[in-house]
Amino acid sequence: MDNKKIKYFVYARKSSEAEDRQVASIDAQIDELEKITKDYGLKVIDTFSEKQSAKAPGRPIFNEMLQRIHRNEAQGILCWKLDRLARNPIDGGQIQWMLQQGVIQNIQTSGRSYTPTDNVLMMSVEFGMANQFIRDLSQNVKRGLKRKVSLGWITGVAPSGYLNTPDRVKGMKIIIKDPERFHLVRQMWNLMLTGNYTVPQIWKKTDKEWGYRTIKRRLLGGNPISRSAVYKIFTNPFYYGFFEFPKGSGNWCKGAHEPMITAEEYDQVQILLGRKGKPRPKKHVFAFTGLMKCGNCGSAITAEEKIKRQKNGNIHRYIYYHCTRRKDENCTEKAVELKELNGQINEILGSLTISEKFKNWAIKYLHEIRKEEAETQTTALQNKQGEFETITKQLSSLLIKFTSPDNADDRLISNKDYQELRGQLQQKKAVIEQELQTQNRKIDEWVELSERTFNFARYAKVWFENGDLETKRAIVACLGSDLTLNGGKLALNLRPTFKTIFDNAPLAEKELVNVRTYESALTTKQNAQTMSERLTWLRDLDSNQDKQLQRLLSCH
C-alpha cells in the first residue's frame, strides 16, 4: 500500500492523571510526528490534540476524529504510540474493527505501521497491555491513597490555612500549617464563635482589613477568597482533626495534622450556621436552643458560654441566648443571660399553675365522663359485634350460592359478581374488626393522656425548678409553640390544650373554694352538678391535644 496516497489525521493526547506522568507532552509528541511525516512523505490534513484520560470511553475530540474518518475525510491516523488512541477495550475494539474493515487504511506510530492485512493479534496485545496498565495503576493508586489515609493524612489539596509538601519524596508527603495564613483562618473561627459576626461579614473583613489571598489566586493577580470558600472553611471537620474518606462514605478518619479548633468549637459554629443533622457529642449542652426564634428578625436563637476570670482567680461561667442574625446581620435583639431566662419561664409557669384540689377533682371527673361514655360505648360495641357476625354469615352464604351447583353454568351468581360482593364484604368486615380492637384502647389512652396533662399543669413549675437540662427543655416544649425573644422578653403561644385548661381554671377554682371540704365537692349532689356544668369543656379536651404534645407528654 502506498502510504503517500493516504490522508492522515495527527492525534496527540496527554492526560493530567498519573497514567501519563512519564509520557511526553503534546507539543513534544507533535514535534516527533512532524519528523515522521517528513521522513515518510505523509499527507496530513488536520491535527487533533486532547488533554483527557483514555481509560474510559467518551473523549469528544477522539470521537470527532473517528466520525470524520467514517466520512472518508482521512484514511489514516498518525500517533506517537498506540496507547495514545485507547486504554479501554471499547475504544480499542472500535479502532481494530475500523482497521479490519478498511475504514482506516493505516495507523502509523513512531515505531510501527498497522494495516488491514496485518495479523490483529499484535494490536490486540498492545491495546490489552494499555488497558491492563490502567487497571494496575488504578489499584496501585487506591492502595497508595488508603495507606496515606491510614497514616492520618488527607488526600488532595490541603484546606485553607494548611499546605501540602510536594517537595518531599513520595510516601513522605504530609500536611503542615501555612505560616502565612494559619493564624488568619483561626481568627475567622474566633469571630464566628463570638456569635456577633455572620459569614458575609467575616468574608468582607478578610478582604478589606486583612488582605487575605489564597495561594493560587495570589499568583493570578491577588483576588480575595470567595464567600463560598469561607462557608466551606466553617463546615469542614478537617479543622478539628477529622476527615471523611472516601467522601460521602460516612467513614471518618482522625487526621495526623495539627487541628486548628476543638470539636466543641466546630459544633458551636454549626449551630450558629443553622445546619441540620445530628450534632456530635459535646460538653456544652444548652437547654433551649432550637426552641426559640428572634422576635425582631425571625432568625434562630442560639446560646454560648462566656467565661470571666477575676484577678483573684475566681472563674464565673455565664450562658447567654442571642439571635444568630442569620436573616438580618444588623439585628439589634439583645442577648439574655440564662438566669434571667429561667426566671421568666418560672414566672410564666407560676401564673399558669393549677391547684392540687382542682387537679384531683378534674381527673376524677374525667374518669366519670369516660365511665359514662364507656357504658354508651358498650352498646355501640355490641352493635358492631352484631354487624361483624352478620357480615361473616353473609360471606358464608355468598360462598354457598357460588359453589353449590356442580355445573358452573347453573350457578346462582356469576364469578364477577361473586368476586365483587365478596371484596366489598371483606373490606367492611376488616373495618369493623379494626374498630372493635381499637375502641376500648382509645378510651384508656384518652384518660391516661388527660391525667398526664393535668399533672403537668399542676407540677410543671416544680419540675422545672428541680429538673435537669433535658427536663427543662421538655417542659418548655410542652407548654407552648412559637417561642420568641423580643426585647429580651420570652413570649409564647400556649398549646390549645393548656389554653383550654388555664382559661377555665379560675372559674373552676372559685367553685371549689365555695365548697367547705374536698370530699363534699365530690359527694354533694348539688355541688357535683354545678361543677359538671362548669366543666363541660373537659369533654372536648382530647380534641385540643395536638400530636406533638401527645408525644411530649407520653415521655414524662
Image: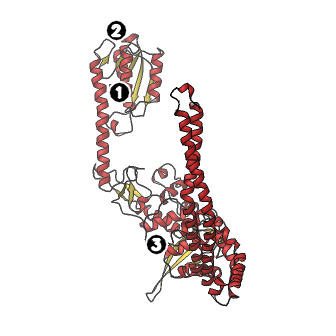
- Quick check: marks 1 and 3 in contact, CB under 8 Å? no
Q: Earlier in the sequence, mark 3 or mark 2?
A: 2
Q: Does residue 257 appear left or right of residue 409 in this picture?
A: left
Tag nearer the camera, 1 or 3: 3
Looking at the picture, how far across and down is residue 124, in whole percent? 29, 22
Q: Which residue is mark 2?
A: 1
- Tell me how far mark 3 sits from mark 2, CA to CA: 82 Å
Q: Which residue is mark 1?
A: 89
> Does residue 123 sit above or below 453 in this rendering?
above
Looking at the picture, how far across and down is residue 33, in whole percent? 36, 24
- Tell me how far mark 1 sits from mark 3, CA to CA: 57 Å
Instruction: Classify mark 3: helix, strand or loop.
Output: loop
- Tell me how far mark 2 sits from mark 1, CA to CA: 28 Å
Q: Check disc 2 and give the amino acid type.
A: Met
Looking at the picture, how far across and down is residue 140, in whole percent? 28, 42
Q: Residue furthest front?
A: 405
Front residue of this view, candidates 27 and 419? 419
Residue 118 seen in render = yes
Q: Which residue is mark 3?
A: 284
Q: Earlier in the sequence, mark 2 or mark 1?
A: 2
> Does residue 53 sit above or below 368 in this rendering?
above
Tag nearer the camera, 2 or 1: 1
Q: Earlier in the sequence, mark 1 or mark 3?
A: 1
Q: Check disc 3 and give the amino acid type.
A: His
Q: Check disc 1 and give the amino acid type.
A: Pro
Q: How is the image coloured?
A: secondary structure
